[in-house]
Amino acid sequence: MELAQPAPVDRVTLHTLDSARYPAAGNGLRDYDVRVRVGGEWRTVAEVRGNVVGVVESRFDSVVAEAVEIVGLASNDGNYSRIVELEVRGG
């Protein structure tokens, strides 16, 4: 996700697939990395492994980022998942 302009970022909240029919423990995004682009270079600022809930907040040292991305590595069912919403915040 390209930011409108470089801005401080210190947390990212990911909402993955999580409903009565498709609970996160069976269908959500399990493993992923949170990456930010700073000065044209991508860096990993958080790693999530073994997630089984619908909403995960990752906090990290504040950086002035140009963009944020999620690198999906595995879902809980081994086939697919979704990112329903991504919140990027800073202070």
Image (cartoon, rainbow, N blue to C red):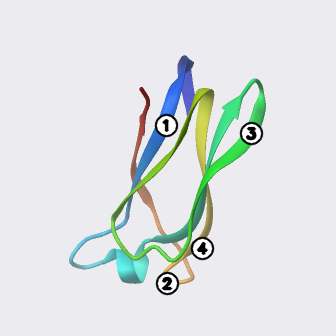
Q: Secondary structure at mark 2?
A: loop
Q: Identify which residue is drawn at 39% across, 83% down.
A: 26
User: Label 2: few (<14), some or many (≥20) within 10 Å?
Assistant: some
Q: Is residue 38 above or below residue 30?
A: above
Q: Residue at x 56, y 83 (%)?
A: 78
Task: Spot the residue most to the front.
Answer: 61
- Element assignment for label 4: strand
Residue at image mark 2: 77
Label 4 and label 3: CA atoms lie apart by: 20 Å
The first of marks 1 and 2 along the sequence is 1
Q: Amino acid at mark 1?
A: Asp
Q: CA distance from mark 4 to mark 2?
A: 8 Å
Please name the residue shown 49% across and 80% down the image: 76
- Say if 89 sits above or below 26 in the image: above
Q: Which residue is mark 3?
A: 42
Q: Position of residue 15 (x, y in %)?
A: 37, 56
Point out the frontmost of discs 1 and 2. 1
- For badge 4, the amino acid type reads Ala
Instruction: For the N terminus, give its image quadrant.
Output: top right
Q: Provide the residue designation for mark 1.
A: 10
Q: Position of residue 68 (x, y in %)?
A: 58, 38
Q: Which residue is mark 4?
A: 74
In the image, farthest residue toward the right: 41
Ranked by sequence position, the earlier of labels 3 and 1 is 1
Query: Please, which residue is most extreme toward the left here?
Result: 20
Label 1 vs label 4, nearer the camera: 1
* Kind of residue at badge 2: Asp
